[in-house]
Image: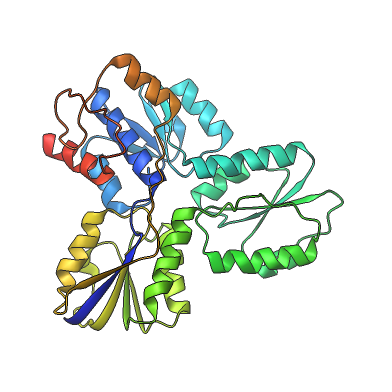
Amino acid sequence: MNVDKVILAAPRGFCAGVEMAIKALAWLVRTFDGPVYCYHEIVHNKLVVRRFEQLGVVFVDDISEVPPGHPIMLSAHGSAPEVVAAATEQASYMVDAVCPLVTKVHHEVKVRAGKGYRIVYVGHEDHEEAVGTMAVAPEAIHPVESVADVEALPEFGDPVALLAQTTLSHRDWEGVLHSARERFPDMWTPGRSDLCFATTNRQAALTAIAERCSTVVIVGSSNSSNTRALEKLARELGCENVYRVNRASELPDDITGMVGLTAGASAPEELINEVLDRLAPTGGIEEVSITDEDEYFPPPRNLRELIEASGSLASFSLGGPPSPIPMVDRKVAASDVLDGLIASR
């Protein structure tokens, strides 16, 4: 490689919801003997999933695969109501690590459906978040992914509401929103956008650096919706070469010039550093930040209650014995939590 400079987008990598989910699952691993089960991948990143598998976590796609009496965590993407009910009945202890922003959409679906609305839901029909959301009120939801899908919707005699998967590309969302408003002028939309602030921030940061770069590298897994949205956006912005990689080893050897680097919301910082080491820019690294993200999502309520009841305080960063530092601490990064648990094994 002959990379002149790397322009590093900020924000990038882990979002608040991912931080919360990883810390919560790590706490369960540390607390319970025997395997901890997780319904679907806790977050969409191969390295994170592999790390938890090394710690004995078993990922399943059906709650019936979990032997009765084991702890279960539900993934950050949100689960169907029947899955939550089955996990509650099956598990010795159940934690729903759904991102609060997804919970907001689930609530909006339930309320609007209860008021007799037809819900136009913008999302990728096979994505776990979309599957869980549509299961909240399947009889009221009409999924769409494109302007053509909106145009193909029937005329509704009932009022219409528009809701969305949180990790959509902002550009894709705007087109569908405009088309839906033309078809249904009196359509209800939430006062605050359903699109995740972290997803929007990462797309805005990429937009801020793209025109300066001959190559853009996006770190993240192929099943991560927000990562794929970054890849699509980079191409739409006219970048000559766009590479989405899980790890630095997937990069081609002939990258040259000015390189932009970002990462999806499920990608740990260590993978970004690994890519930086591989690119080895002769002119150094410039970070371009468009905003500071200081959002923090505390662990689910029942997990907080368990932590308080057990009196078990430990430092996640060290993965060590009890200490005065709460196990779920906003000052401790999820990547350090996971590294600490791995190191202590």
- Residue 302 locus on image (x, y percent): 43, 23
Q: Is 237 left or right of 264, judged from the image as shown?
A: right
In the image shown, does 223 or 185 lie closer to the viewer?
A: 185
Identify the residue at image location x=40%, y=73%: 208
- Residue 313 locus on image (x, y percent): 24, 23
Can residue 225 be seen at all in this image of the molecule?
no
Identify the residue at image location x=43%, y=73%: 207
Residue 52, image quadrant: top left
- Residue 240 locus on image (x, y percent): 37, 84
In the image shown, does 95 or 58 lie closer to the viewer?
A: 95
Q: Is 147 left or right of 17, judged from the image as shown?
A: right
Residue 331 lies, with reference to residue 287, above or below; the image says above
Residue 121 lies, with reference to residue 318, above or below; the image says below
Q: Quadrant of the N terminus?
A: bottom left
Residue 128 lies, with reference to residue 258, above or below; the image says above
Q: Residue furthest right?
A: 157
Q: Quadrant of the C terminus?
A: top left
Identify the residue at image location x=38%, y=61%: 222
Can residue 246 be seen at all in this image of the molecule?
yes
- Residue 38 locus on image (x, y percent): 37, 36
Residue 64, image quadrant: top left
Tally the numbered discs.
Answer: 0
Identify the residue at image location x=21%, y=66%: 275
Colour scheme of the picture? rainbow
In the image shown, does 112 or 84 lie closer to the viewer?
A: 112
Residue 85, image quadrant: top right
